Amino acid sequence: MKPIETSLLKIKESLHDAGYKLTSQREATMKVLLEKESEHMSAEEIYLLVKKVNPDIGLATVYRTLEMLTELEIVNKVSFDDGLARYDLKKDGAKHFHHHLLCTQCGDIEEVHEDLLEEIEAIVESRFQFLVKDHRLTFHGICKKCQDQEKKGIQ
Amino acid sequence: MKPIETSLLKIKESLHDAGYKLTSQREATMKVLLEKESEHMSAEEIYLLVKKVNPDIGLATVYRTLEMLTELEIVNKVSFDDGLARYDLKKDGAKHFHHHLLCTQCGDIEEVHEDLLEEIEAIVESRFQFLVKDHRLTFHGICKKCQDQEKKGIQ
DNA sequence: TTTTCTGCAAATTTTTTGCACTGAG
DNA sequence: CTCAGTGCAAAAAATTTGCAGAAAA
């Protein structure tokens, strides 16, 4: 079975376990999220893609589906300080949310799947008595591509 | 001289150096930000506080001032995924932005001023060829106070 | 005196909500 | 059948913009 199919089945099971009904709109939205993993789409962008498969879906339904998936911790809601929410699928089996590299020049976002924060979490837990459940880490900077282009420009 | 006064003078100097005019509205906004350091206020909240001192100020001016201060890297715009921007003063002399502990139970936000990320930044720079300029790190979890309250509830 | 800045109101953008109808279980 | 879920349009919330007048430099 294709990996997307497997993930979709798991997600459907979570919906069912939580007492949610499986509608065609929800299934179409989940498929789009699985197919466009790592795209950091806004609700509007997701809506436009789902509309191609299911033209009658309303934007409000997409918002409601994303809210539900966030509650079930299947997706993570993130904001890169540009004034709108983006939705990012939690990778299968990942204990925590992954990190992001945001290029402040071209706007591109790369993902970092190594955890890397375990040591820091331990420090925070002991020093602040704060029980860590998840994290959001984004580095702002210049990506490889933009660095190379800058070099070209100088020469 | 009081530390706030010193910081205010430095900020005024930055404005001047960047060619911005010093208006009473901007000064009042900067003072509020300095007095309520560590409050993670939204534009609306800042506006209401500035209004107490300068009742004629408009919300748009506060937005414009915050945008300017963000551009000058005097404040950092952050979002805690609750759908509105918050503004956080960059601490004097801090090389990078500080971190946050967001309690998902009571909504309280604590600040962490240790950098802690230098090692991880080095990894990211070498492994992804990404030139790190700044970062945003927020831990989601349960604060000390809420943990204690839960314990009480169980007993 | 020259520009930038401001307040106000209107416009935009993003997200949420009410409600009658539909469809999954 | 029954109640959760949906589409639509309207409302709400957050932010931006246009413009004429005000005030720094």
Image (spheres, coloured by chain):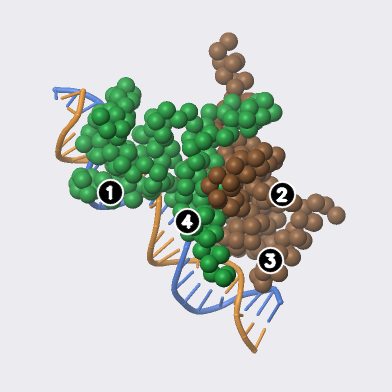
Chain colours: A green, B brown, C orange, D blue
Tag of residue B101: none
Identify the residue position indicated by label 4 in the image.
Answer: A107
Tag of residue A49: 1
Q: Is residue A30 shown above or below D24?
A: above
The verdict on a common chain for dots 4 and 2 is: no
Other-residue count near label 3 (Cα within 10 Å), few / some / many at <14 / 14–19 / ≥20? some
Percent position of residue A121, x then y: 61, 30
What distance separates the C-alpha of mark 4 from that of mark 1? 21 Å
Identify the residue position indicated by label 2 in the image.
Answer: B94
For discs 3 and 1, the disc positioned in front in the rendered view: 1
Percent position of residue A66, x then y: 35, 39
For discs 2 and 3, the disc positioned in front in the rendered view: 2
Q: Which amino acid type is marked by label 4?
A: Gly
Residue at 69%, 28% (x, y): give it.
A127
For discs 4 and 2, the disc positioned in front in the rendered view: 4
What distance separates the C-alpha of mark 4 from that of mark 2? 25 Å
What chain does badge 1 belong to? A
Q: Does any portion of residue A70 appear in the rendered image?
A: no
Percent position of residue B28, x then y: 68, 59
Residue at 59%, 42% (x, y): give it.
B123
Q: Which amino acid type is marked by label 2?
A: Ala
What distance separates the C-alpha of mark 4 from that of mark 3? 27 Å
Q: Would you say B11 lies left or right of A32 here?
A: right
What distance separates the C-alpha of mark 2 from that of mark 3? 19 Å
Q: Give the secondary structure at mark 1.
A: helix
Q: Which amino acid type is marked by label 1?
A: Leu
Q: Which amino acid type is marked by label 3?
A: Leu
Q: Earlier in the sequence, mark 2 or mark 3?
A: 3
Residue at 80%, 51% (x, y): give it.
B3
The verdict on a common chain for dots 4 and 1 is: yes
